[in-house]
Amino acid sequence: MTKTIAAIELTRYEKARLIGARALQLAMGAPVLVKSPKGMYNAVKLALYEYEKNALPLQVYRKPIANGE
């Protein structure tokens, strides 16, 4: 079973990286994946809104750590 972004706890660095990458995609013309509130045009705010709605099309890959967690 795969884990979605909503199912794992992200660090603040991972969250910032995801929102920044998605904001760049939106600024370059990628389609918005959720119905955005009226008047919301800022790419960063749209990316954060998509994150809050668990609609980001991005994945986080982590390297296993030494103690096995």
Image: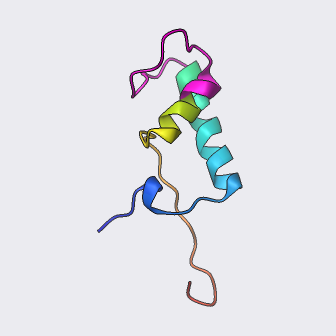
The segment highlighted magenta reads: 28-46
| Magenta segment, prevailing SS (helix, strand or loop) | loop
Residue 44 in the image, given as x and y percentages of width and height? 63, 27
| Residue ID at (60%, 22%) | 43
Direction bottom: furthest residue: 67
Looking at the image, is 24 positioned above or below residue 27? Answer: below
Name the residue nearer the viewer: 21 or 56. Answer: 56
Residue 58 in the image, given as x and y percentages of width and height? 47, 45
Residue 49 in the image, given as x and y percentages of width and height? 53, 31
Name the residue nearer the viewer: 56 or 54. Answer: 54
Residue 11's image quarter? bottom right
Which quadrant is the C terminus positioned in? bottom right
Which quadrant is the N terminus positioned in? bottom left
Direction front: furthest residue: 37
| Residue ID at (59%, 44%) | 18
- Look at the image and say whether residue 34 sits in the magenta stretch: yes
Residue 3's image quarter? bottom left
Direction top: furthest residue: 39
Q: How many marks?
A: 0
- Look at the image and say whether residue 55 sits in the magenta stretch: no
